[in-house]
Image (tube, rainbow, N blue to C red):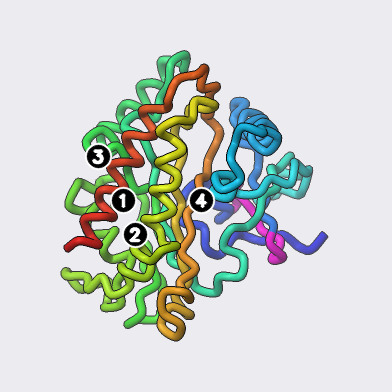
Amino acid sequence: MKMLKDPEHQVAGHMAKDGRLGPLVDGEGRFFKPFQSNGRGENEAKFYESFSSNKNVPDHIRGYFPVYHGTQVVEASNGSGKLPHIVLDDVVYGYPNPSGMDVKIGSRTWYPGVSQQYFNQCLKNDRETTSVSLGFRHAGFKIFDHQESRFWIVEYKVVHGYKVDDARLVLRKFVSSNSLADSIPDCAFASEVYGSSSGILAQLLELKAWFETQTLYHFSSCSVYMFYENESILMKGGEGARAQVKLVDFTHVLDGNGVVDHNFLGGLSSFIKFIQDILES
């Protein structure tokens, strides 16, 4: 196996930096996510096993989830020895300079049966962020600044404090060509990234149509990860953007028990409205 390294384009979650435990990539299209503590890693692996073999999931929906390649014991990023990792497709492999955004979906990230401590922690985070008010919150992003030729990254504490106007603004900056330090984003790439026939909005609407009827799973604390390529969008236009939506983070997925996942569906619908508003403005 090739030497594993930190993912260059990770935008949120546990990062393998400064001796911490986090995901790794092999530089050949594989992403290694270490099992999280308290049984969360086992839960996520079980979800991937279930999902990848579930014949009730339509093929066009399967494409919105990272491809699962089983689990593997590899050297952990924090030097603690060999640990089990979930092996997935590295979804941004082949994207030289992707802008990426992680958006946690749902007005609540807790679910029935959790411990009081976990419930209190989730409730606090949901209330402090836009989760309760909007049904989604930004978890992190890396946006390529075309004027500065570097990535714009805002630290987690600042993103955690975003209000409604901040959420709206960063979704505009995500598809802008002017300097991200400017107060008024130009949304120059909105029609290509958000609005093309294969763009972000079309993909989100396809996902929403599935969530309106799917009762297989309830996705708690799960994220929409959306990304596109910057270098080629300027040369090739909309086709060069290769805008994609993936669902990520499945440590808290429950059996749907024949009931629609209203928490996820409501948050996804709200997020879609924000994207539509940008395209219509």
Residue, x 40% and y 72% (percent of image)?
Answer: 144
| Residue drawn at 41 percent across, 15 percent down | 116
Instruction: Please give the residue where the numbered disc 3 appears in the rendered image.
Output: 134
Q: Answer with left or right where residue 9 lies relative to residue 53.
A: left
The kind of residue tagged 2 is Val
Q: According to the image, label 1 marks what residue?
A: 159
Q: Quadrant of residue 201?
A: bottom left
The correct choice, above or below, for 149 with respect to 71 in the image is: below
Residue under pointer 4: 246
Number of marks: 4
What secondary structure prevails in the magenta region?
Answer: loop
Q: Do tag 2 and tag 1 residues touch (Cβ < 8 Å)? A: yes
Instruction: Inspect the magenta stretch and tell me whether residue 44 lies in it.
Output: no
Q: Is residue 65 above or below residue 145?
A: above
The first of marks 3 and 2 along the sequence is: 3
Mark pair 3, 4: CA separation: 20 Å
The image shows residue 277 at horizontal and vertical percentages of 21, 55
- Which mark is nearer the camera, 3 or 1? 3
Q: Secondary structure at mark 4?
A: strand
Q: Nearer the viewer, residue 2 or 192?
A: 192
Give the CA distance from mark 3 to mark 2.
Answer: 20 Å
| Residue type at the position of mark 3 | Leu
Does residue 29 lie above or below 208 as drawn? below
**Segment tinted magenta in the rendering:** 19-29
Instruction: Name the residue tied to disc 2.
Output: 154
Three-letter amino acid code of the residue under disc 1? Val
The local secondary structure at tag 1 comes to helix
Q: Residue at x 45, y 72 (%)?
A: 241
